[in-house]
Image (cartoon, grey):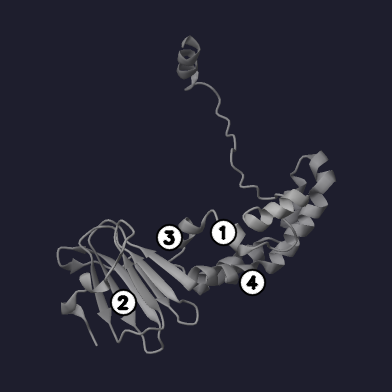
Amino acid sequence: MLLTLAVLLLLPVLPRITIPVDRDQAFSSYDGVLMAIACLRTPKLAVFDSEYPSLRGLSRNSRSLDRRLLAGFERAAWDSTASFVVARLSDSVIEAAARKLPEAYYQAAGTRLASTLKQRRGQLREFATRFYLRMAEHSEVHATQDAETAQLIYHPDGGVEVRVARRVGDQKQSPWFIRRYLPAETESIDLYFGGGKDRIVVTGIPSRAIAVHVFDEMGRRVSMESLLDSTAVHP
């Protein structure tokens, strides 16, 4: 008890040291027969190598957050971000980073680490495209707990533009979410409302090219017609 009290009293004056506790096993190296068998059943046990492992495995733990946080980014954003990273990860940058390893570790694995990073850099654009298409195939849009209006704009090519805006009374604010989905990339859109007095406005002629599913704040699928603002349906 006294020791705990002393520590609490000293906390404000003690030097602060940041201790990483979860490095996400960025450079993991699983080997052996048992681990090979385990990887077949648990693909998230990915191995850091010159080629990217299964996208399914790499994104398994983060899939819920990925679909929520990356929903608003269209393909151009993914392409430009990948190009930005590739352009700045020059050979000299990678080699300098590897040289910051403890000398004993660098002697054992530093050269191979730098070489592997360079090979993965060359595949980053293609891998980013695969990741984008995986997110776009079955996309999710999560609204907030405020009263909101989701506008579904159907285009002649089968595409669907989704716009979500907060609503104060009957006044709709500027959309905070805008994205156009293409039938060549997207099969379905799951629209999650947060429990406010939400509405859906449909513009254009609905198409079956991209399915739109609506869910309430509890994650239960509901009929779109129950939220449809029939006074604001446009041809």
Considering depth in this image, is 167 or 43 the residue closer to the camera? 43
Mark 4 Cα shell of 10 Å, populated few (<14), some (14-19), many (≥20):
few
Task: Say if 135 sits above or below 205 in the image.
Answer: above
At x 46%, y 57%, the residue is 64
Whether pointer 2 and pointer 3 mark residues with C-beta atoms closer than 8 Å, the reply is no
Label 3 – label 4 distance at C-alpha: 22 Å
Between discs 1 and 2, the one toward the N terminus: 1
Using the rendered view, name the quadrant where residue 229 is placed. bottom left
What amino acid type is highlighted by mark number 4? Glu
The residue shown at (51%, 73%) is: 75
**Which image quarter: residue 213?**
bottom left
- Alpha carbon of mark 2 to alpha carbon of mark 4: how far? 31 Å
Residue type of the residue flagged with mark 1: Ser
Pointer 3 or 4: first along the chain: 3
From the viewer's perspective, is 144 left or right of 159? left
> For mark 3, does the 10 Å Cα neighbourhood hold few (<14), some (14 to 19), or many (20 or more) residues?
some
Alpha carbons under labels 3 and 1: distance apart? 13 Å
Q: Position of residue 84 (x, y in %)?
A: 60, 65
Q: Residue furthest top?
A: 2
Say which quarter of the image contains residue 206: bottom left
Decide: is 27 above or below 102: below
Q: According to the image, label 4 marks what residue?
A: 126
Q: Secondary structure at mark 1?
A: loop
The residue beneath circle 2 is: 152
